[in-house]
Image (tube, grey):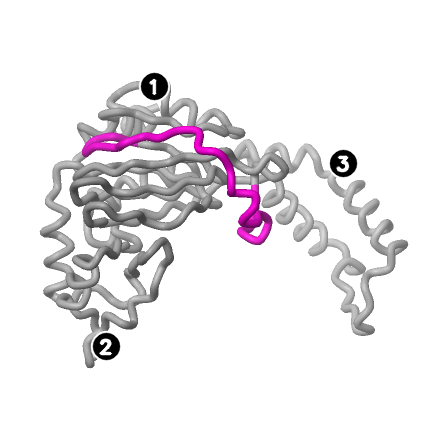
Amino acid sequence: MKDMTRLEHLFFHGSEEGIRRIVGDVDIGAAIYAPGGAQSNLLVWQDWKRRVAILLENGDLRSYEFDLIVNGEAEHSRRLLSPDGSPSAKAVNEAVGAGATLRLFGVGRYDIECAEQVALLKHVFDMPVFANLYMTPPFVGGLQKHFDLDDSLVVQVYGRKTWLLYEGPEENPFPIDYTDVTADDIDSQETRRITLSAGDVLFVPQGIPHKAATEGEESIHIVFGIGVRRPLSDLRALLEEFCRQDPDARRPIRDGKPLPPGRAAQLTERFRNWLLANADCQADHQDGGS
């Protein structure tokens, strides 16, 4: 309860509704906009422009810790490296000045408050969580229309940025891989247009196509990416456990041919029987029992 209260304070300005929807609705399909939700969050009151400038000037960033977004596409940072292999502050600043978005990966490494919030989200959701920072100059878009496989909790920490949300693919509303959805699937109608100012929060569930752009001022926002749990993950874990106990399921196939339908049916039936026989143990494990 204490952790939930802290999340409400950090991202929804003490309101229970938003965080309860995120934590409680496993099939959430709509974005949640919380104006001023993070106005009490210390991340909003930090000088991120200065923080990023110091990281660059001191050579504290490695090439794999950031990239650029140019014309809607992510570009590797290799073209911004100095002869010694470290990022060139001058080259990065020139790229951002020319309209590129700077994206820092795992920004919690450079800020203890951000690291603590990542840890809190991990604890509450019991899922992997990361935090990336985006710095975008005026009148520039970020990534082209896309969707994410994780849920995104967006905190605007400086300036303003307008987000465009679109209808998700009707045939596949919960993609598990980017190859599951084609360009035609995300060529959908705009459903919402939300402009975030410093202190605003936006929760974008996985699978919802979106894009964002600045208007007349520079924007900085932090995205907490929250992993999602799917039945497929549990089924994979259960199938692996079954195979550990069934030698025939681990038997190598060396003839290069697909698994014969008859053998597949036999294994499937044995897996089903194993699930039924171990149902009580699985329930105890999921509930935290021994």
Q: Can you see residue 43? A: no
Is 42 inside the magenta-drawn segment? Answer: no
Q: Which residues are magenta?
A: 175-201
Front position among marks 2 and 1: 2
> Of marks 2 and 1, which one's residue comes earlier in the chain?
1
Name the one closer to the observer, 45 or 136. 136
Residue contact at pointers 1 and 3, CB within 8 angstroms: no
The kind of secondary structure element at disc 3 is: helix
Residue 41 vs residue 172, the one in the foreground? 172
Q: Which residue is mark 3?
A: 276
- Quadrant location of the N terminus in the rendered image: top left
The residue labelled by disc 1 is: 16
- The residue tagged 2 is 85
At a point 27% along the width and 32% down the height, the residue shown is 195
Residue sitting at 43 percent across and 23 percent down?
A: 21
Q: Nearer the viewer, residue 60 or 275?
A: 60
Q: Amino acid at mark 1?
A: Glu
Residue at horizontal 21 percent and vertical 44 percent from the top? 220
What x and y, as percent, mark residue 170? Answer: 60, 34
The x and y percentages for residue 35 are 26, 24
Locate residue 92: give its quadrant. Answer: bottom left
Image quadrant in which you'd find residue 39: top left
279 on left or right of 49: right
